Amino acid sequence: MKPVFHEKMWGGRKLEKFDYDLPAGDIGECWAISGHPHGRSEVENGEFAGQFIDDLWKNHGELFGDPKGKVFPLLTKILDAEASLSVQVHPDNDYAWKHEHELGKTECWYIIDAEPGSYLIYGHNAKNKAELDDMIESGKWDDLLRKVPVKTGDFFYVPSGTVHALNKGIMALETQQSSDTTYRLYDYDRVEKSTGKKRELHIKQSEDTITVPHKDPQLDIQTKTEGKNKFTTFVQPPISPFFAVYRWEVKEPVTLKHNIGKYTLVSVINGTGKITVDGKDYDLKKGVHLIVPATVNEWTLDGSLDIIASESGEK
Ligand code: ZN
């Protein structure tokens, strides 16, 4: 897939480490695998070269196991937080369809890189709705927001309704529902360079959608070692209804199949190697993103590869 880049006031230049030909400016987001209208992925090579995921979803359902859903449900991004992102929350499917006419947004982060001492915002300390609204309206951000230390290799599951922010010095691979609805709760009173204005806040929508009290999800992260290879499952249904996310640390050849879904999203975050499908080899290196379609039953990985993969939880 061809990545699509987005400039952000909090972005930087660290995505260059994936050897991308980055456009000028502060690039915050690489939309790596996306069928969302705000950044559609185009197929780079092979039979469907030049076509976009959302069109393939409509016209070639066999690639995705003839899905029932109207839209390609997942979105993979790499984020470079040179500065901190706004403190934000995303709606669930019901609220998002009603107010934004798109999917809600449950997301998760695999931390590719975190500078020493990095932390992020995850959850809040209000005990009930009245306390939440009061702390927001009187700007008691230090009391309200939970700071969580973060290091390279960590994983965070961020269900819709969770107050959150990636902070400066963090690079993350995000797997999320295909949605671009963000309700900004607090933006550190920053002014955008290009407009000279503060970015819009969405206090009412935030208060409507924040889960109170905050509850940490109980994850069941499982790692298995096979020979020199290591396979981690970070989340999967039913804990995470919309997607499963895996890390594959490959050092010797391994043949894999789809696990819970019919097609698999693959992002190489480090190393080099190849993927073999039906006797044909394709080179892999850090920064390469691909979809193994439902028409492929199994594939072989070879080389030294660090991969984050995901599957939709949609039936
Ligand atoms: Zn978010």
Image (cartoon, helix red, strand yellow):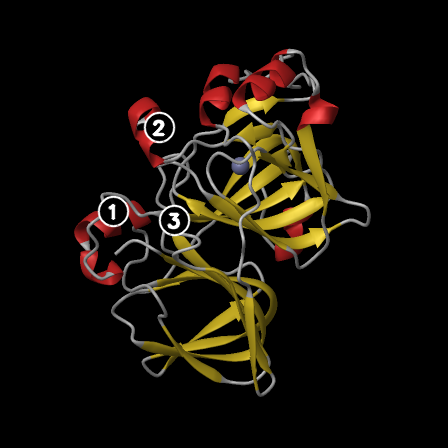
The numbered mark at residue 95 is 2
Residue 41 seen anywhere in this rendered image of the structure: yes
Q: Mark 3 packing: few (<14 Cα in 10 Å), some, or many (20+)? A: many
Q: Is mark 2 on a helix, strand or loop?
A: helix
Q: What residue type is labelled 2?
A: Tyr
| Relative depth, front residue between 126 and 270 | 126
Give the residue displayed 65% in from the left and 12% down from the top: 196
Give the residue displayed 66% in from the left and 11% down from the top: 138
Q: Residue furthest right?
A: 117
- Distance from disc 1 to disc 2, alpha carbons, whole Å, reads 26 Å
Left or right: where does residue 192 sit relative to residue 264?
right
Earlier sequence position, callout 1 versus callout 2: 1
Earlier sequence position, callout 2 versus callout 3: 3
Q: Mark 1 points at which residue?
A: 55
- Image coordinates of residue 179 in percent, x first then y, are 40, 37
The numbered mark at residue 74 is 3
Q: Which amino acid does label 1 sit on?
A: Asp
- Image coordinates of residue 294 in percent, x first then y, are 27, 66
Give the residue displayed 60% in from the left and 19% down from the top: 131
Give the residue displayed 30% in from the left and 30% down from the top: 97
Cβ at disc 1 under 8 Å from ligand 1: no
- Distance from disc 3 to disc 1, alpha carbons, whole Å, reads 15 Å
Q: Which residue lies furthest to the bottom in this view?
A: 227
- Distance from disc 2 to disc 3, alpha carbons, whole Å, reads 18 Å
* 83 up-or-down from 223: above or below: above
